[in-house]
């Protein structure tokens, strides 16, 4: 049995949300640079260059890559042999989110009641938490600040099984084309 203190969960969630808001994954950065080198359109090259430059500044200055720091989503794998001590698991995650958004000066967008009162929680909590119980003695955390603006360009489709992978790819490409410059890159 592996004992993990709730403060360790809180601290790791905080660290991960700050990192996710300040730094683009290096694999993604390489893909952006590769796309910029291949891009033939002057406007496309300019936009990709601005995205790359923005990331460099955000990373260096430790400021958000985007002003829309979104809804806090946490994916958790909890080993069956883990025992959390000194606190509540969900509270630890939400406290980590709260501290990251307050201390990192990240935009707090979550409202208590999205239908009637729309009162901002001022903590960006509660987080959306997906939990899987897995074999083992470890906890794995993956965080995603899910921007709210990008959903304005979301789309849904009911595809037939016969559409297969090509149908999925075609739908995604068409959705991106329709969104054009209106959604976050």
Image (tube, rainbow, N blue to C red):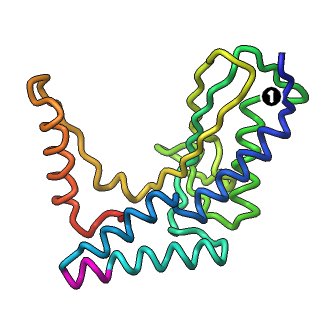
Question: Against 166, is 42 above or below?
Answer: below
Question: Against 119, is 179 above or below?
Answer: below
Number of numbered labels in the structure image? 1
Quadrant showing the C terminus: bottom left
Quadrant in which residue 104 is drawn: bottom right
Quadrant in which residue 126 is drawn: top right
Quadrant showing the N terminus: top right
Q: What residue appears at the point 51 percent right and 72 percent down from the top-left corner?
A: 55
At which x and y percent is residue 86?
90, 29
Q: Is residue 161 left or right of residue 134?
A: left
Quadrant in which residue 12 is drawn: top right
Main structural element of the magenta stretch: helix, strand or loop?
helix
Q: What residue appears at the point 63 percent right and 51 percent down from the top-left corner?
A: 124
Question: Against 7, is 107 above or below?
Answer: below
Secondary element at tag 1: loop
Q: 166 or 181: nearer the eye?
A: 166
Q: Is residue 21 magenta?
A: no
Q: Is residue 44 magenta?
A: yes
Q: Which residues are magenta?
A: 41-46
At which x and y percent is residue 125?
65, 45
At which x and y percent is residue 89?
75, 29
Q: Which residue is mark 1?
A: 88
Q: Would you call the spot at circle 1 few (<14 residues within 10 Å), some (14-19), or many (20 or more)?
A: few
Question: Against 3, is 69 above or below?
Answer: below
């Amino acid at each position: 049995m592996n004992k993990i203190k709730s403060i360790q969960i809180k601290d790791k969630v905080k660290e991960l949300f700050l990192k996710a808001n300040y730094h683009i994954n290096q694999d993604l950065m390489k893909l952006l640079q590769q796309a910029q080198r291949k891009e033939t359109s002057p406007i496309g090259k300019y936009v990709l260059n601005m995205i790359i430059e923005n990331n460099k500044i955000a990373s260096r200055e430790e400021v958000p890559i985007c002003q829309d720091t979104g809804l806090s989503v946490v994916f958790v794998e909890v080993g069956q042999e883990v025992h959390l001590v000194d606190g509540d698991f969900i509270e630890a995650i939400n406290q980590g989110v709260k501290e990251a958004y307050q201390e990192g000066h990240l935009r707090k967008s979550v409202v208590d009641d999205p239908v009637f009162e729309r009162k901002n929680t001022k903590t960006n909590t509660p987080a959306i938490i997906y939990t899987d119980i897995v074999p083992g003695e470890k906890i794995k955390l993956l965080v995603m600040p899910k921007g709210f603006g990008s959903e304005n360009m979301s789309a849904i489709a009911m595809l037939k099984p016969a559409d297969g992978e090509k149908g999925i790819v075609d739908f995604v490409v068409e959705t991106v084309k329709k969104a054009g410059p209106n959604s976050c890159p």
